[in-house]
Structures are given as C-alpha cells and as structure tokens.
Image (spheres, grey):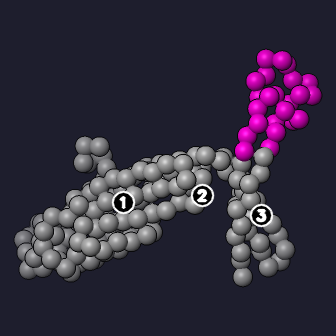
C-alpha cells in the first residue's frame, strides 16, 4: 500500500553558488522554502517531487456542455496548475441544482429543464479561483434536427 506524506524542506542555495560565483549573482543569497511530496513504495523507494511553497492554485480552463437534455449526463472538466500549486488543493463543483462534486472531471445529470449556473472553485492555502459555465437543460423530447449539444470553453464565454 502506498502512503503519502508532505514534508517541509528549507533549501539554502547560497552553499551551491558561493564557490566561483560573481558577487552580482543574486542567486547566491537566495533561500527558498520547498515542499516535497514523498510517496513510500513497497520496494522501499522514496521518489521525491519538489514544489515551491506558497504557490496559489490557478484555473487554466473550464469546459462543459452548453446544452443538455434533461436526464442526459454531462462531463465538466477543469484544468489548473496542479504541478506547481501548493498542496492541498480543493475542488468543488456546484451545479446550480443543489448537487456538488469534488474532482477536476465531474459528471452530472440535470433532472429538470432550465438554465443552470455551474460553478467550479479551486483553492489551496495560498489562494482561490472560480469560474462559471451556464448550461441550458431542455426537455428530453426536444430533439430538433441539427440541434446537437455543444461544448463551451472559457474563450467562448468572453472571459
């Protein structure tokens, strides 16, 4: 079984750059705090993944259907700076009908026709971000020819 630990590390870069570095090298006096995600492996390996401390989560894009039939399942996706952002990262979708989800890729089925604001919120200890999509849900028997459910992205909403 894999176990994950978050270990704070403080790395002083001065010791790496003082030998043979010019005085104008500003990096010689930098100190940075980093966090390492350590995963224990059954074979005893300890892979380290370093990330800067204090990096807020940023939302890079949100996608989802612009139109769905009532009872049809829609896929909603959020993209963020997961490799750089400080941990832990929380995700929360609010579908506007009382239902929520907590993953970057969420599936949801609206039971009644209407227009629903779908809000995704991402947060970590250093910041939060949110975006909203609007989904038009039509009655299930509204299947006019050529009226396919579309996908909207942030760029199509005038963001």
Chain-order first, disc 1 or disc 2: 2
- Left or right position of 78 against 144: right
Disc number at residue 87? Answer: 2
Is 29 a magenta residue?
yes
- Left or right position of 134 against 126: left
Dot 2 alpha-carbon crowd within 10 angstroms: few under 14, some 14 to 19, many 20 or more: many
Which is more toward the observer, 38 or 152? 38
- Image quadrant occupied by the N terminus: bottom right
Q: Position of residue 16 (x, y in %)?
A: 87, 35
Q: Distance of mark 1 from mark 2, alpha carbons?
A: 18 Å
> Is residue 148 something that shows in the picture?
no
- Image quadrant occupied by the C terminus: top left
Dot 1 alpha-carbon crowd within 10 angstroms: few under 14, some 14 to 19, many 20 or more: many
Tell me whether the residue at label 1 lies in contact with that at label 2, contact meaning CB atoms closer than 8 angstroms.
no
Q: Which residue is mark 1?
A: 120
Is 95 a magenta residue?
no
> Is residue 101 something that shows in the picture?
yes
Q: Position of residue 152 (x, y in %)?
A: 27, 56
Q: Which residues are magenta?
A: 11-33
Disc number at residue 47? Answer: 3
* Secondary structure type for disc 1: strand
Q: Position of residue 25 (x, y in %)?
A: 79, 22
Seen in the picture, residue 87 relative to 53 is either above or below; the reply is below
The structure residue drawn at horizontal position 45% and vertical position 69%, both measured from the top left corner, is 103
Q: Which tag is nearer the camera, tag 2 or tag 3?
A: 2
């Amino acid at each position: 079984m894999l176990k994950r630990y978050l270990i704070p590390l403080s790395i002083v870069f001065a010791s790496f750059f003082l030998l043979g570095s010019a005085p104008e090298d500003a990096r010689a006096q930098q100190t940075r705090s980093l966090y390492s995600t350590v995963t224990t492996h059954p074979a005893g390996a300890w892979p380290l993944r370093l990330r800067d401390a204090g990096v807020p989560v940023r939302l890079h894009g949100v996608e989802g259907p612009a139109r769905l039939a009532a009872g049809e399942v829609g896929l909603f996706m959020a993209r963020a700076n997961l490799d750089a952002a400080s941990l832990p990262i929380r995700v929360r979708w609010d579908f506007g009908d009382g239902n929520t989800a907590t993953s970057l890729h969420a599936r949801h089925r609206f039971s009644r026709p209407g227009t629903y604001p779908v809000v995704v919120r991402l947060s970590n200890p250093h910041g939060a971000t949110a975006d909203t999509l609007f989904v038009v849900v039509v009655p299930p028997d509204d299947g006019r020819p050529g009226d396919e459910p579309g996908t909207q992205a942030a760029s199509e909403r005038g963001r």
